[in-house]
Image (cartoon, helix red, strand yellow):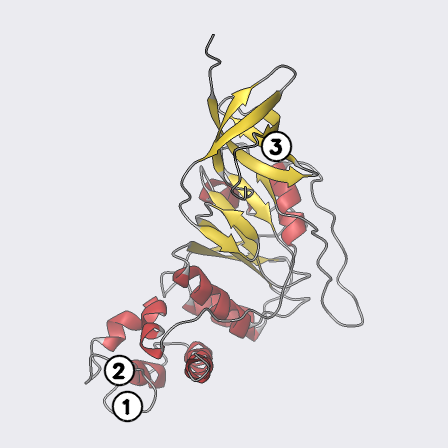
């Protein structure tokens, strides 16, 4: 007798067991067949054979749309870049670096400004003024008062989203609100250093009510740029594109060249000055890395 197989999504791997959400949203505890040698990641779509008592055998890993290495997770389509109004103060340098990494990985970034119940400061004003105008999706959220979370949940509809951002900005609190349960430990921001310590210990997908999934990740403050050539970097700043059409040279790096449309836009405050300065810093890093290849 042929046993019917099913498709599912790997939510987590724990102690040699894979917890798979099936087509009926049930969680199935699976082991692998001996012949299945490839590494299985959270986010993998798989074929499995159901057994009794919500158990199963993993048979095959389906082709991945993509694979992230930090955290190690498959088939992500959205990056929620969480920045706080304050405590800790927003870092536009980190924001721009995360936006670049999202662009490089062909993922949709959504800027999430958490702690929106706190007073405005200049960094938040710059973010609110420039980034939506530059066509970056932005949502204001207060995890403390459960404001804006429904809009955020709708933005993830049917997708796998990963949380990114520095420690202390409220990633675990947002996760808990979106999943309607206490799924992740939270930790107060240290009064002494003004930031938090990351609390997540493993990669796990949390199902949302609308058939979306959210990945929790450790907080971080430093990200290495991927290996690339200097000519690739300008194209990853998509808000520069319209102004780059005014550059004299098609391969303009918007650095030392004359008649540069991007530099003119910075002078006219059409491109946020800190955004351009962060671009130059990353360009210098890419050029330095080229010497090591």
Residue 246, relative to residue 181: is it above or below? below
Q: Which residue is mark 3?
A: 19
Q: Which residue is mark 2?
A: 252
Question: Residue 289: percent from the left, percent from the top?
Answer: 46, 80
| Total number of numbered discs in the rendering | 3
Residue drawn at the location 70% of the way across and 58% of the way down = 198
Q: Residue 95 has which mark? A: none
Q: Secondary structure at mark 3?
A: strand
Q: Secondary structure at mark 1?
A: loop
Question: Residue 194: percent from the left, percent from the top?
Answer: 73, 70
Q: Which of the 4 image quadrants contains residue 113? A: bottom right
Q: Which of the 4 image quadrants contains residue 63? A: top left
Q: In this view of the protein, which residue sits in the foreground, 21 or 259?
A: 21
**Mark 3: few/some/many CA within 10 Å (<14, 14-19, 20+):** many
Describe residue 191's horizontal placement relative to residue 12 as left or right.
Answer: right
Residue drawn at the location 76% of the way across and 72% of the way down = 193
CA distance for labels 3 and 2: 49 Å
Q: Secondary structure at mark 2?
A: loop
Residue drawn at the location 57% of the way across and 54% of the way down = 71
Q: Earlier in the sequence, mark 3 or mark 2?
A: 3
**Mark 1: few/some/many CA within 10 Å (<14, 14-19, 20+):** few
- Dividing the image into 4 quarters, which one contains the C terminus? bottom left
Question: Residue 279: percent from the left, percent from the top?
Answer: 42, 78
Q: In this view of the protein, which residue sits in the foreground, 101 or 145?
A: 101
Residue 149, relative to residue 54: is it above or below? below
Q: Which residue is mark 1?
A: 257
Nearest to viewer (mark 3 / mark 1) = 3
């Amino acid at each position: 007798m042929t046993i019917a197989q099913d498709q599912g999504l790997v939510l987590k791997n724990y102690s040699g067991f894979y917890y798979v959400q099936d087509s009926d949203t049930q969680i199935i505890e699976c082991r692998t067949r001996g012949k299945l040698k490839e590494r299985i990641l959270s986010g993998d779509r798989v074929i499995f054979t159901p057994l009794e008592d919500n158990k199963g055998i993993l048979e095959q890993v389906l082709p991945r749309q993509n694979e992230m290495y930090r955290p190690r997770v498959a088939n992500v389509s959205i990056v929620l870049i969480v920045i706080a109004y304050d405590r800790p103060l927003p870092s536009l340098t980190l924001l721009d670096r995360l936006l670049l990494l999202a662009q490089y990985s062909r993922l949709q970034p959504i800027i999430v400004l958490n702690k929106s119940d706190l007073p405005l400061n200049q960094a938040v004003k710059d973010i609110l003024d420039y980034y939506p105008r530059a066509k970056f999706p932005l949502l204001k959220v207060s995890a403390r008062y459960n404001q804006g979370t429904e809009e955020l949940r709708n933005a993830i509809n049917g997708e796998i989203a990963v949380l990114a951002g520095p420690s202390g900005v409220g990633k675990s609190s947002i996760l808990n609100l979106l999943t309607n349960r206490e799924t992740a430990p939270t930790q107060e921001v240290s009064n002494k250093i003004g930031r938090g310590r990351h609390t997540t210990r493993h990669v796990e997908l949390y199902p949302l009510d609308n058939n979306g999934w959210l990945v929790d990740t450790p907080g971080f403050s430093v990200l290495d740029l991927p290996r690339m050539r200097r000519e690739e970097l300008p194209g990853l700043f998509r808000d520069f594109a319209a102004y780059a059409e005014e550059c004299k040279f098609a391969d303009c790096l918007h650095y030392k060249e004359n008649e540069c449309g991007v530099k003119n836009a910075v002078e006219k405050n059409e491109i946020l000055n800190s955004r351009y300065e962060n671009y130059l810093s990353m360009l210098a890093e890419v050029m330095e890395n080229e010497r090591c290849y």
